[in-house]
Image (cartoon, grey):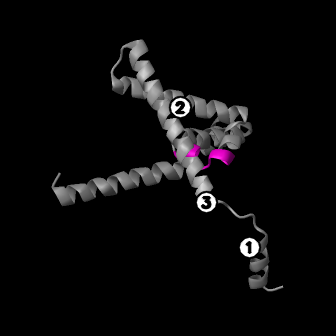
Amino acid sequence: MKTIEYKKIVEKNLPKEDKFKNSIVAFLVGGLVGIIAQGLTELYGFLFEITSTQANTLTIITLIFVGCLLTCLGFFDTMVHFARAGLIIPITGFAHSMMSATLEYKKDGLVTGIGANMFKLAGAVIVYGVVGAYFFSFLFYVIFGG
């Protein structure tokens, strides 16, 4: 069987993805995460009588903790299967990527397992985030003169 014929058979039998439905679900779930985060920020600010910057920090810590906890308990992957990018894009997805790599390599020890592989998935996000920030800062400086 030729490669082209094989690819046609595979494409024919792959399940079709409803991109419109997935986009709507991701939008709604991502919006819900944003609403929950804003609610937490307001709650922390009210309860602890702190500034919004301090409340934002507590909110980020909370979202990271919840993302890690759901990953450890095995719920996050199931939730992502339903919500798609609605949970992967926010900071919960970053926490999930780090925690899943940590759990996968914990048997190899602290240094060669966890330490060497913790950023396996998240490393690219960090690298391209830093490079992108540098590039756009330089571009802003060139266009607007600082």
Q: Does the stretch in magenta take in 87?
A: yes
Secondary structure predominantly adopted by residues drawn in magenta: helix
- Residue type at numbered disc 2: Leu
**Quadrant in which the N terminus appears:** bottom right
Residue 119: percent from left, percent from top: 57, 45
- Which residue sits furthest left? 145
Q: Where residue 11 is drawn, which disc sits there?
A: 1
Nearer to us in this view, 116 or 28: 28
Asked whether the beta carbons under mark 1 and mark 2 sit within 8 Å of each other, the answer is: no
Of circles 1 and 2, the one toward us is 1
Pointer 2 residue: 63
| Residue 58 visible from this viewpoint | no
Nearer to us in this view, 131 or 80: 80
Between the residue at mark 1 and the residue at mark 2, the CA separation in whole angstroms equals: 38 Å
Asked whether the beta carbons under mark 3 and mark 1 sit within 8 Å of each other, the answer is: no
Q: Which residues are magenta?
A: 81-89
Disc on the earlier residue, 3 or 1: 1
Residue 11: percent from left, percent from top: 74, 73
